[in-house]
Amino acid sequence: IPCHPKLSQAFVYTFLDADNSVQYAVATPPKVGRRGGAPVLLTFHGADVVTDSGPWFGAYKAQETAWIIFPTNRRKLGYDWEGPGRINAEFALQEAIHISGTWNKTWHTIDPTLIVYAGHSMGGHGCLLFSTHYPDRAVATAPAAGWISWPLYVPMFLRVGRSEADPVLTALLEAAIAENGADIYAPNVAGVPAIVRMGGNDRTVPPWNLFRTARKWNEWINDRNWTQISEVPHKPHWWNKVVDGPVMQKFFDAHLLDPKLPPLPKQFVVTTINPASSGPRGYLRIQQLTIPYRIGNLHVDQVSSTQWTVKTHNVARVRVEGKPLLVGRARPTVLVMDGTTVLVPADTFDICKLQHTWVACSSIHNNPNTRMPEQYGPLRQFMEGSPLLFVVGSLGNADFQKAALDFAIWAANNYYMTGKYSVQIIKDSDLTVATAKQYNLVLFGGPNENQWSQKLQRNFPIGVGHASFNVSGSVYTDAGLGAMFLLPGFGTHLAAVVCGTDLAGFVRATSFFPTHTAQTVPDFMIVNEQWDWGGENYGIVATGFYGNDWQVSALASWLL
C-alpha cells in the first residue's frame, strides 16, 4: 500500500491511540470529491484478519464520493471491537477526518455525522455495536455474518462452572459484559436503514444471529420488511463479494451517493446499560443511571419539532448535546421530563433527577465526588480511554515484590501482544503526583505493600485493612483472599488495586486481572481459595458495582 496515494487508492496512516500507543488504519479515498462533506463507510474486519492485507481492504471497491475507513481493532484478533477496540475505531476515524481536511485539497473533508457502518464476522459484531451504540450518526448499517453477543455466540450458559451458581450472582457477572450485547440496544437503531448479509451454509457464525437482529430491528420500527435480508444459499462464512457484491453495492450507493440521516421516528427510545460506551440518540445522551448496570431508557415522543415529551426509566442524568447539529434533525428547545418542563438552551446542557423532578445541573465534570461516564466501569475500563501505568509496590516483603513485578511484566506483555499497548511499569516510590495525573493507574499491592495505595486509600470504595476486606460493613478475614477493585483516579482517570490478605491471595487476584472484554468481572470482586477449582460456583465471596457516589450499590452487589 503506498504512503502517498491518489484518489480512490488505499493508503496506511498512523495515529496515537487513547493510551498513546502508535496504531494504524487503512483508508480508501473516494473517486471524486463531494462538496458539503464526504460520507464514510466505516467497516470492521473479522477475527484473524490483518487490516492492511489485500484480501480485506481490497474486498471493498473505492466508492464514488465516500471514504472507506478500515480500523484495526488494535490487532487482528484484538478486542472484538469492544472496549479498546471500539475506542481504536473512534481514534482511527478522527485521524482520517484530520487527514481528509488537510492533506489533499481534492479530498473533501469527512463529515463524521454521515456514516454507513459495515463489517464481517467479528466485524459484523462491531458493526452491530456501533450501529446500536452510536445511532445518531448512522446513515445506514450493513452487518455481514455478525454475531450478537458473547453469551449468545459462545454460549456462556453451557459453562460447567454455571451448574450450581447462584442465579443472582450469574446475572451480576453477566451484567459486566451486557453493554456489548447488540440486542439490548436494539431500540436505538429504530428507523436506520439496514441490510443483513450472510451465507446460508455459514458454520462459523450461525445465520440466526442476523435473522434475529433483523426481527428485533423490524419490531422497533413496526415494519416487518424494514431490514433487508440477503441470505445467499449454499455460501459459507466468507466468499468473494460477500461484503461488496451487487446487492451490497446497491445498498451502499443508495446511502452514500446522496447521504442523508434518516428522520427520527416520532416516538423513539434511547437505551443504555453503561453510559461509558454509548452515544446520543436524538441529541439525548444518558450520562448516569439510578441503579448501575440495569437498563436505563428514555421514551421520547416528539410532540412537535421543538417540544418533546420524555418518560424515563432508571436514569439519573441526561445530556442534551449541542454540537454538531445534525442536518435534517430538529433539536428540542423544550423537554417535558416525567411531567417536569425543562427549557433547553442552544449549548450542551445537563439535566439531573432530584427525587421526583428534573432540573438543570452543572457539568458532571464539575463534581469530583460523582462517577462520570468515563469512570463508569466495569473493572476492565481502566484499559480504555487513557494511557496506562502499572505501579508496583515496594513496601511488602521480597516474595511479594517479586510476585508483583513478575505479574506486572507478564500483564504488560499480554497487553502488547493483544493490542499493541504501550504500558509502562514503575516502582511506587518513583511515581510523582504530576506523572500520576496523566494515567489510569493499576496499583499492585494494598496499603501495606504499595505507597500509592496508601495515598489513595481515602478514595477506596472497598475497605482494605491488615489481612482483611470490608464491603459495606461485611468484613472478610480469611487467609488467601484476593481482591481487585476500581476507584476514582485523578480527574477523569481511573485507578485499580490488586491485593490480597496474604501473598497467596494477591496471586489469586491476578487470575482475574482483565485482559479481554469478555471477562465477567464487575467493579469489584473478592475471591477465596475455592476460586481455584470451583470458580464462580463457590469461589466468589463479594462482587458487584458502585453507584454514582462511588459507594458499593446494595441493589447491584452480591455478598456471601
Image (tube, helix red, strand yellow):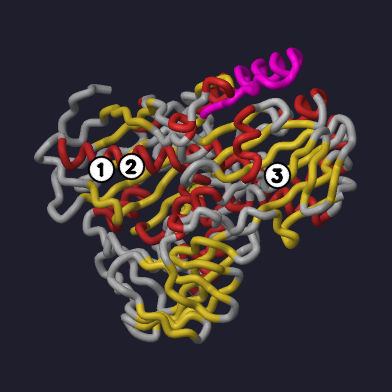
Q: Quadrant of the N terminus?
A: top left
Determine which of the numbered discs, if any, sits on residue 93 in the image: 2
Residue that numbered label 3 is attached to: 524
Question: At x 85% / y 30%, what residue is drawn?
Answer: 480
Q: Is residue 33 left or right of residue 20?
A: left
Helix, strand or loop at disc 2? helix
Per the model, the C-alpha gap separating discs 1 and 3 is: 38 Å
* Vertical order, 165 against 427 (above or below): below
User: What's the magenta bit mostly, secondary-structure-wise?
Assistant: helix
Q: Which residue is mark 1?
A: 97
Quadrant in the picture for residue 456:
top right
CA distance for labels 2 and 1: 6 Å
Marking on residue 151: none
Left or right, 431 with reference to 26? right
Point out the stretch of residues depicted in magenta.
389-411
Determine if residue 460 is in view.
Answer: yes
In the rendered structure, which disc, 3 or 2, sits on the residue that comes first in sequence?
2
Q: Are marks 2 and 1 in contact (CB under 8 Å)?
A: yes
